[in-house]
Image (spheres, helix red, strand yellow):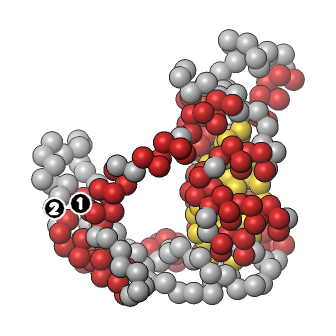
């Protein structure tokens, strides 16, 4: 716990959130149906933009599909997760509702496929996933969020038979934890929270960066002494020029799904 956390108020919810950590190794135990129903219902109660409820989630149970998703993620533990969900931005259901009410979903008047709706559906899917993740931690389960499902979005879309006006957003792997990793450090609160306006001087953003670099480096050294990891600022710099991100661009695959990301 950093110095800035010493005087925080506390309750069970806050402790659950402050102690969240990604779990990548699970016990080979199934999750009971009552727990599954609870997690899914909690996700449904997350905030939703304009009450469109424009997200869905595919619970993956077929082992072959899990294996394929693990290959997409380049993470073998994905195939071993007792529960695996892919959260989806979903305007397909709403399009079907609108079409039933007489809207021509392939006309210029149709706007559920606009870039604005796409981004809101993404937001809703993330909010639902986070609600499920928090509930899972409160039930002593472990989770890891899988942005890596978008390494090959077209392959994932085909694998899950996602229809028009849908797009995968994130994966969530859950199970009973079989590891207890240390909490990953976070920047000081003042580096991410500002009052009234974004700081005009970037010097403020660099405040305590060297100290945070040392903290992050120590965290990774203790976690895996055989595999040194760059300091935080070096990790950011490496990602800032990673041309591999172009092969994972959202726009081409999303437009194939019927979204108009230029509108």
Q: Give residue 10's position: percent from left, percent from top.
A: 42, 76
Name the residue nearer the viewer: 180 or 139: 180
The residue drawn where x is 65% and y is 72% is 76
Q: Please tell me which residue is depicted at 77% across the width and 19% down the height of the picture.
A: 105
Which image quadrant for residue 5?
bottom left
Q: Say which mark, if any, is on residue 224.
A: none
Front position among marks 1 and 2: 2
Q: Which residue is mark 2?
A: 207
**Looking at the rendering, which quadrant does residue 102 occupy?**
top right
Q: Quadrant of residue 81?
A: bottom right
Residue 5 can be seen, yes or no: no
Instruction: Identify the element where label 1 is drawn.
Output: helix
Q: Is residue 19 above or below residue 100?
A: below
In this rendering, is residue 101 above or below 174?
Answer: above
Q: Is residue 152 visible?
A: yes
| Residue displayed at 35% across by 74% down | 229
Q: Position of residue 173 (x, y in %)?
A: 66, 68
- Is residue 210 depicted above or below 114 in this figure? below
Number of disc labels = 2
Q: Which mark is residue 190?
A: 1
Q: CB of mark 1 within 8 Å of CB of mark 2?
A: yes
């Amino acid at each position: 716990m950093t110095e800035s956390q010493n005087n925080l108020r506390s309750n069970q919810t806050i402790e659950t959130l402050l102690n969240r950590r990604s779990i990548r190794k699970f016990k080979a135990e199934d999750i009971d149906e009552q727990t599954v129903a609870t997690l899914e219902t909690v996700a449904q109660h997350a905030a939703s933009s304009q009450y469109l409820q424009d997200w869905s989630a595919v619970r993956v149970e077929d082992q072959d599909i899990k294996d394929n998703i693990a290959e997409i993620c380049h993470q073998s533990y994905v195939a071993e997760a007792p529960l695996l969900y892919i959260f989806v931005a979903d305007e397909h259901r709403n399009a079907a509702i609108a079409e039933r009410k007489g809207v021509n979903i392939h006309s210029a008047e149709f706007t559920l496929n606009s870039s604005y709706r796409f981004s809101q559906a993404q937001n809703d899917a993330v909010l639902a996933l986070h609600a499920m993740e928090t509930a899972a931690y409160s039930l002593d389960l472990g989770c890891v969020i899988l942005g890596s499902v978008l390494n090959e979005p077209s392959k994932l879309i085909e694998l899950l038979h996602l229809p028009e006006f849908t797009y995968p957003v994130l994966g969530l792997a859950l199970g009973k934890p079989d590891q207890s990793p240390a909490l990953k450090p976070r920047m000081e609160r003042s580096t991410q929270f500002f009052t009234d306006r974004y700081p005009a001087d970037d010097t403020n953003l660099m405040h305590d960066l060297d100290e945070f670099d040392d903290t992050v480096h120590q965290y990774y050294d203790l976690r895996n002494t055989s595999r040194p990891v760059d300091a935080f600022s070096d990790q950011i710099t490496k990602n800032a020029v990673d041309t591999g991100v172009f092969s994972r661009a959202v726009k081409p695959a999303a437009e194939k799904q019927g979204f108009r990301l230029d509108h």
